[in-house]
Image (spheres, rainbow, N blue to C red):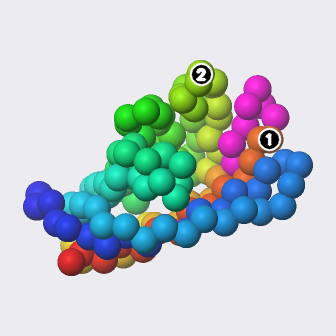
Amino acid sequence: MMVQAARIAITGTQTMEDGGPQTLELVTDGSYCYEPGFALLSYVESEMTGLEGVVTSFQIEDGKTVTLRRSGKVNAEMVFDRRQAHESLYDVGFGAMMISVVTEDMTVLLNEHGGVLDLDYRVEVEHALCSRNRYHIEIQTI
């Protein structure tokens, strides 16, 4: 599996239970590797996201499961799976909390040149809705 440089365009929208949607757009360079049934996308967060220096990666398996990992000053893992909710410990820099990730919809259209990853999910804390989130990620190898 060959790692390639990639241009990554991310649009993230978060709607908190008590407010309107907030959208963040980021275009950055990162790395991408692909083989049928598996893809890995990785980039370093910027000051714009509030996570400067944190490495974020998306691991996609069989187009059915996506694992988001963050490492650095914030450490987190979130699993997106259409078949079931996943609980994980989410470190927010000043403490950690147990969250549930419930995937509403997922679109994976990837090949060796890049493609599109769409995630639509809910975050629940103690089984109460905390936020509704969407990621739209476009990857283009360079």
From the top left corner, tell me how far across and down residue 55 is, in percent: 35, 45
Element at label 2: loop
Seen at 11% across and 61% down, the residue is 2
Seen at 88% across and 49% down, the residue is 18
How crowded pointer 1 is (Cα within 10 Å; few <14, some 14-19, many 20+) is rated as: some
Please provide the residue range marked out in magenta: 122-128
Residue 20 among those drawn in magenta = no
Q: Which residue is mark 2?
A: 95
Instruction: Identify the amino acid type marked 1.
Output: Leu
Instruction: Identify the amino acid type marked 2.
Output: Gly
| Image quadrant in which the C terminus is located | bottom left
Residue placed farthest to the front in the image?
47
Check the image and report above or below for 128 versus 32.
above
Seen at 33% across and 56% down, the residue is 43
Q: Where residue 74 is drawn, which disc sits there?
A: none
Element at label 1: strand
- Does residue 61 appear in the picture of this structure? no
- Quadrant location of residue 92? top right
Check the image and report above or below for 127 versus 36.
above
Check the image and report above or below for 35 versus 82.
below
Q: Which residue is mark 1?
A: 129
Residue 127 among those drawn in magenta = yes
From the top left corner, tell me how far across and down residue 35 is, in percent: 20, 62
Check the image and report above or below for 78 versus 122.
above
Seen at 28% across and 62% down, the residue is 30
Judging depth in this view, the residue of 70 and 101 nearest the camera is 70
- Is residue 113 shown left or right of residue 23? left
